[in-house]
């Protein structure tokens, strides 16, 4: 198993360069959009934990840890039943802290680290949600498929560009033979496209994978001197 983060150049396996292909199912009706957002939220959060429990992912864990994971999933569902999906964190860093904390519950032997780089300005709240949830899905993919020992989530906001990377030291894969699963296609690529951003996945067999998420901040306007 590869135990270090490779610095060698990797190959892109997927990139959000064709918006029409991913936004074909986008609804104009407000109620449909709300339903879609709730569905994605349940997929990205509650379903991930329930699937892992059902698959025996906690078979070798202490009962107390299993109870904590089940309690978090139950709280999520209770919030939906009582009033819809809860509000996301107000800033990119706080959102990623929440993402890493939740992911660590389901990580098993995977160590997850958050690295905060230069933050020159805050993202608008409407951009925090898609970026944070896309990072959460990327970590779920690491846990499910990478057989990794370590994952690093790094973020920075420089100029008008916010960038989040999720890097793992897992088994990697061959991009030419990879297919986009529903999690990558809808929870990562489509989510970033819908807020005007982009996502790409890079990997090589034996060298782990890197998911890069980028969004551009909406330009601010300065009133002209009168």
Image (cartoon, grey):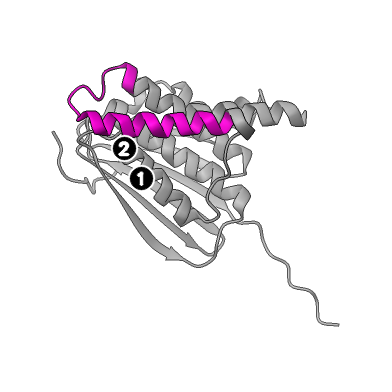
Question: Which quadrant of the rendered structure holds the N terminus?
Answer: top left
- In the rendering, at what x and y percent does residue 42 appear? 52, 28
Residue at 31% across / 30% down in the picture?
A: 67
Residue at 37% across / 20% down in the picture?
A: 51
Provide the secondary structure element on which disc 1 rests: helix
Segment tinted magenta in the rendering: 53-80
- In the rendering, at what x and y percent does residue 177 appear? 34, 20
In this rendering, position of residue 155 left or right of residue 193? left
Question: Which quadrant of the rendered structure holds the C terminus?
Answer: bottom right
Q: Which residue is mark 1?
A: 101
What main secondary structure does the magenta stretch of the protein show? helix
Measured along the vertical axis of the image, is residue 83 above or below residue 213? above
Residue at 30% across / 17% down in the picture?
A: 55
Which residue is nearer to you in this view: 195 or 11? 195
Q: Which residue is mark 2?
A: 105
Measured along the vertical axis of the image, is residue 26 above or below residue 157? above
Which residue is nearer to you in this view: 55 or 142? 55
- In the rendering, at what x and y percent does residue 108 appear? 23, 33
Measured along the vertical axis of the image, is residue 92 above or below residue 20? below
Measured along the vertical axis of the image, is residue 151 above or below residue 147? below
- What is the total number of numbered labels drawn onto the structure image? 2
Contact, CB < 8 Å: mark 2 with mark 1? yes
Quarter of the image where one finds residue 149: top left
Quarter of the image where one finds residue 17: top right
| Numbered tag placed on residue 67 in the rendering | none
The answer to if 62 sits in the magenta stretch is yes
- In the rendering, at what x and y percent does residue 195 appear? 62, 43
Provide the secondary structure element on which disc 2 rests: helix
- State whether residue 65 appears in this view: yes
């Amino acid at each position: 198993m590869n135990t270090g983060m490779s610095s060698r150049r990797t190959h892109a396996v997927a990139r959000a360069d064709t918006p029409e292909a991913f936004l074909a199912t986008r609804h104009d009706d407000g109620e449909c959009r709300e339903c879609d957002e709730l569905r994605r939220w349940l997929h990205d959060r509650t379903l991930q934990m329930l699937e892992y429990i059902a698959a025996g992912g906690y078979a070798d864990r202490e009962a107390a840890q299993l109870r904590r994971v089940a309690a978090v999933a139950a709280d999520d569902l209770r919030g939906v039943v009582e009033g819809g999906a809860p509000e996301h964190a107000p800033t990119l860093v706080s959102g990623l802290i929440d993402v890493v904390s939740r992911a660590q519950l389901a990580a098993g032997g995977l160590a997850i680290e958050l690295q905060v780089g230069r933050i020159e300005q805050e993202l608008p709240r409407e951009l925090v949600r898609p970026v944070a949830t896309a990072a959460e899905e990327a970590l779920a993919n690491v846990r499910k498929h990478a057989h990794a020992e370590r994952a690093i989530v790094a973020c920075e906001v420089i100029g008008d560009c916010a960038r989040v990377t999720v890097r793992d030291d897992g088994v990697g894969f061959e991009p030419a033979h990879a297919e986009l699963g529903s999690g990558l296609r809808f929870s990562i690529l489509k989510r970033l496209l819908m807020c005007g951003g982009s996502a790409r996945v890079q990997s090589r067999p034996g060298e782990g994978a890197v998911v890069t998420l980028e969004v551009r901040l909406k330009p601010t306007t300065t009133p002209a001197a009168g």
